[in-house]
Image (cartoon, helix red, strand yellow):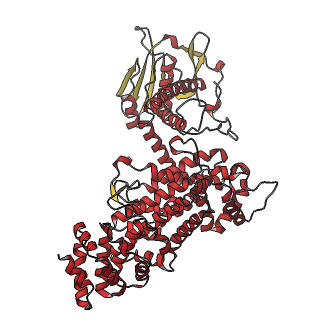
Amino acid sequence: MNVVEVVERLGSEQEPVRKLAAFKLQAHISDPSIADAFVAVGGVKPLRTLALTSTGNTLAYSLTSLSNLLDVDRGWDGIDAAILDRIVSLVIKEPLVNILRPALSVLVCLVGHGRGQGHGMLRTKGFLEAIVNRLGSADHVLCANSLMLINALTQDAWNAKNMGGGHSRTNSHSKEWEGFVQEMRRLGVQRAVSTLMQQTPTPDLLLPPLQVFQSLTLTLLHSWSRIRVDPSHLSILDTIWKESDLNVISGTKWTKLGFATEFPLGEFAFVGREEERGECGCGWLGLSDLVGFVEKDREGFRKLLLEQLAKPEQLRCPLARASITVTNLLYAHFSLSMPDPSSHPKIESPFSPRGSTMTLSTAYDNGLCPLLLSWGSLHHATLLAFFRLWTESHAIIDDFDRVKDLVEVLLSTVMSAPDTKDKGVKEVERELFEFEYRLLRRLQLERLERVQERTWEGPVRDLTEKIRREAWTFVKWQRIKCLGRGEWFPIEDGGKRGKKWRFVILEEEKTRKCLRIGEFDTKDDTKPTLDMLPEKVDLSLAGEITSAIKSPTSTQSNTSTLKSRPRSSSLANALKSTPTTIPQIVVKAQSPNARSPLLTLNPQTLHSHAEWLDGLLIALGREPVCAETEGRVSVLVSTGVKVRLMELRNEGEGVKISGVVGEIRREGVGVGFYYGDPL
């Protein structure tokens, strides 16, 4: 391309000549060598004039050429207040897409180059609103350019705030930053960008600016969490107090709002994530979330406070503390679920020097997270879910950490599902509020089991074995107690004396164990006394214990001689699969010359059979064999491990996960049940 000839034609008095020259220039000016030659022969001035005075396609070509020239970091001397005003005016008023595209691109270059132009643009009435409106355009290029400009303006305003005095609220740049953020919220920028993220599939042109916006959002949230809440923020807290319509009584004010003390500023204090212990206040982010909750539904806020204050103090859910906790949970959910930063993809940043890259800390395996942009709505919905779970679990103030753990599982379940990206924030809010409490508890237990398998495999394995030994000790004691309680057994064919019922009970003497036996015509509801049981069977004389399954319609029987403890019993399986059988327990003598057994028992139920068979084996110093006994031990072990992991009981044993839990309340628990008997 003849650069000199093109520059001459840009200044021609004939419109068709200027249009053709601008058209050719836009395709070649991106070449740095051509850009240098163009600047050297004075091409910037006629190009600037064309951008100021032309219309239609000529204007579109000239703006594209100017954008491409700035993109290779050339031609900055042609940018002044006049050209800036012209382009800003076009962005606000121009309806043609082919003009808006390059106009926005030029502004992205200006703001991203760090020339302080963003501040003046934002002061122009209708400018920011016009850009936000372009986010809904069906033209992907226009939409992408608009989003890149929003990203650049956000970064420029944030840099100006930090350079102008940090986080002081009295600093003019800080006030302008706060105004910028409020205007972005008013215009619904995050809602519009979230809608773009949910497009399927996401257009390639939109993906990089969407990733940058997402990265900026998390960076801002991260920065806000580290802004200290100081006395300059007291006016905000006073606004929350006024919205509550409460009265100060006996000097108590902030504790009524759910703060732990009357000095609320310290409760927003930030604790470093790397050394985090317990709760952290998340600084300004925690305070802004509380303010957002109040402002979103003022009447609901007052109603919630009054409902809590009407309860006894121990039953109240502290609103402010719960709000700060929810902020922490959301922060952890979005940041801790990210992959290793070293694996994050690099993309070009529209507000960094050309050719530089930035790390997408929120890439989520190069994906997008629309819910991150609905932080305020998620906080509001999660806080309401916190109060719902508090009520449904009948929690007291000492149960706060347990409710917190439930809410953490709720967030993880609802917001980590495979279809989360396709859900709107309203659907997620509904799921958070309607998720069934019992299902949530079951998911929490499953999560504890996964944690058991991964994180605390060794300690939990030791704990499991310890609880298993305790469970076997308890079950063995329980089986012996069942024998000591005694039981009625039917006598087949009337027995030797023509009696129909036999009562058997275990009597434990100092040196031996024996069975006391009495036969009766009828089964009495009253337990017979020992003097009514004349027969004795000394268990020290017992040898084999045989369990026989005898069908009432068949003379055949299946016997199993029990000398040692098989862990899985084919007999128990037979009992389970043949519910119509009548199990028998036969106690044989040690003497090989004995022709008849010492005792034959006909339990009426399979449960009774398991109790007496295993009870007799345990009394003889042998191991139990019934599947029912094994199953009971398994249930006790499973429940015991879960209870210890959830810290429902904490006596310095088990695996500690978090917090310190007080003793379990026992009020109203009686001893009117068999296992309540003392050892």
Expressed as whole percent of the image width and height from the top left, the position of residue 24 reads: 21, 79
Q: 251 or 494: nearer the eye?
A: 251
Expressed as whole percent of the image width and height from the top left, the position of residue 176 reads: 56, 68
Expressed as whole percent of the image width and height from the top left, the position of residue 91 reads: 41, 80
- Which residue is outermost to the front? 41
Asked whether, in this view, residue 332 is left or right of residue 361, the answer is right
Asked whether, in this view, residue 41 is left or right of residue 214, the answer is left
At horizontal 40% and vertical 70% (from top left) the residue drawn is 110
Q: 630 or 157: nearer the eye?
A: 157
Check the image and report above or below for 656 versus 566.
below
At horizontal 28% and vertical 77% (from top left) the residue drawn is 43
Asked whether, in this view, residue 677 is left or right of residue 134, the answer is right
Q: Quadrant of residue 386?
A: bottom right
- Which residue is outermost to the left? 1
Expressed as whole percent of the image width and height from the top left, the position of residue 99 reads: 33, 81
Q: Quadrant of the N terminus?
A: bottom left
- Which residue is outermost to the bottom? 14
Q: 666 or 538: nearer the eye?
A: 666
Check the image and report above or below for 381 versus 66.
above
| Residue 679 can be seen, yes or no | yes
Q: 541 or 387: nearer the eye?
A: 387
- Which residue is outermost to the right? 250
Q: Quadrant of residue 5?
A: bottom left
